[in-house]
Amino acid sequence: MNILILGSGGREHALAWKLSQSIKVSRIFTGPGNAGTSYLGTNLQLDPEDFNAVKKAVLENNIKMVIVGPEAPLVAGIHDFFLSDNALKNVPVIGPDKSAARLEGSKDFAKAFLTKHEIPTAPYKSFDRSTIKEVPDFLKSFASPYVIKADGLAAGKGVLIFENLDDAEKEVTAMLDGKFGKAGHKVVIEQFLKGIELSVFIVTDGNSYKLLPEAKDYKRVGVGDTGLNTGGMGAVSPVPFANRGFIEKVKQRIIDPTIKGLSEEGINYKGFIFFGLMNVSGDPYVIEYNARLGDPESEVTIPRIKSDLFELMEGVAEGNLSERILEIDERYVTTVMVTSGGYPGHYEKGKEISGLERTKDCVVFHSGTKMSDDKVVTAGGRVLAVSAWGRTMSEALHGSYGNAGLLSFDNMYYRTDIGFDLQEKC
Ligand code: AMP
Ligand code: GLY
């Protein structure tokens, strides 16, 4: 079967890498993909949010399944577009429809869903221009810090945390005044949760689900979790504190009621759900839902899947996921994100990357690269994710860092302490 993966980052390269190992997959297309995905199949120069371009690519290349990497096409309704088109309606889309993708596309929807289905999350209230006068009193009902979230998609920049009440109030006003355009026309204010974060993933066909490996990512740019937030500077899986007892709580208190809640609301969710969780003294709370896999989490979770990932994709498409097998590798996988110096601020692109052929006992997933003549050059802030396996976290990190050190391009940067907060016990 020919498949199309939509997106262009490390997550999509990891999906293409894993799916290329399936005997059931004939050709892999990635739209638009990157230099890494071009080695595994064919890159198609298309914008995943241009549904007519996706349609043309699907029909021209006899594609029989579409797997959606990023959230934007899902929230914009790519699944619904396929279902309502006669030529596409039999091509399954792995990723939720527009209504189901509101779990990520609207923080207000997600919080109302969590509250209604009694799933642990921080207390909150939503505001719009008509209720702006109530904001100061609500903020005063919490102790600082104050968590302010734009309702809609804001390219990962829509969550701000303030120590000071005046700053929090000003931010709410700025958001409601259009700082994030339509995404901020509604604002969620919620209580700050103190704990340690982790990412939990499932894939579901709407009835049953499979639990994928969990991961922890490192969002800050600087060593010791300092500096600006990024898309993620590295990740590890498994997460030592997510032991059997903790994961059991996650299943009972969070995943099961989410699946039940979706079904009760008549929402048919087909695809991945990413639970952004906070472990507060051993109890899991939902910080956010995402309608997709994480990045760089995919670069550690996908390499831990031993069985055929396509089996799960087919199970989602056919609605028989419970009959499919998922085997997980017990070993650790770590990834170190190699970035362009200056990221997440200003950085330069087009730098030639050397050393890729020298790496070994690891897999280098491309995040922001492209081919220029026959050379691989940088094309983004996050450039390469170096993933390695190990019996211990230290062993895996040794593989990631040993290989990251073999790579080079102008102004290359990576964090040198991925896993620093988890490593003692493993
Ligand atoms: P979100 O986009 O909702 O995941 O928020 C981005 C980041 O803000 C999260 O990964 C957390 O680090 C932080 N965050 C969001 N909500 C809270 C909260 N209620 N308490 C503490 N930190 C939070
Ligand atoms: N690494 C976090 C995300 O994919 O949203």
Image: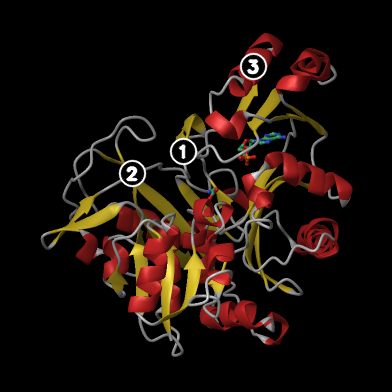
Q: Amino acid at mark 1?
A: Thr
- Mark 3 closeness class: few <14, some 14–19, many ≥20 residues within 10 Å: some
- Looking at the picture, tell me which residue is in the foreground, 309 or 184: 184
- Looking at the picture, tell me which residue is in the foreground, 295 or 356: 295
- Mark 1 closeness class: few <14, some 14–19, many ≥20 residues within 10 Å: some
**Label 3 vs 1, first from the N-terminus:** 3
**Label 1 vs 2, first from the N-terminus:** 1
Label 3, label 1: how far apart the Cα atoms are: 25 Å
Relative to 343, say whether 236 is above or below.
Answer: below
Q: Quadrant of the N terminus?
A: bottom left
**Left or right placement of residue 54 versus residue 135 in this view:** left
Label 3 residue near ligand 1, CB within 8 Å? no
Q: Secondary structure at mark 1?
A: loop
Image spot of residue 128 (x, y percent): 72, 25
Image spot of residue 384 (x, y percent): 33, 54
Is there any visible trace of residue 258 in the rendered image?
yes
**Label 2 vs 3, first from the N-terminus:** 3
Callouts 1 and 2 close, C-beta under 8 Å? yes
Q: Nearer the viewer, mark 3 or mark 1?
A: 3
Q: Amino acid at mark 3?
A: Thr
Q: Say which residue label 1 marks.
A: 230
Residue extending farthest left: 373
Q: What colour scheme has been applied to the protein in the rendered image?
A: secondary structure
Label 2, label 3: how far apart the Cα atoms are: 34 Å
Q: How many marks?
A: 3
Which of the numbered marks, if any, corresponds to residue 173? Answer: 3
Q: Amino acid at mark 2?
A: Thr
Residue at x 36% of width, y 43% of height: 414
Q: Secondary structure at mark 2?
A: strand
Relative to 330, say whether 194 is above or below.
Answer: above
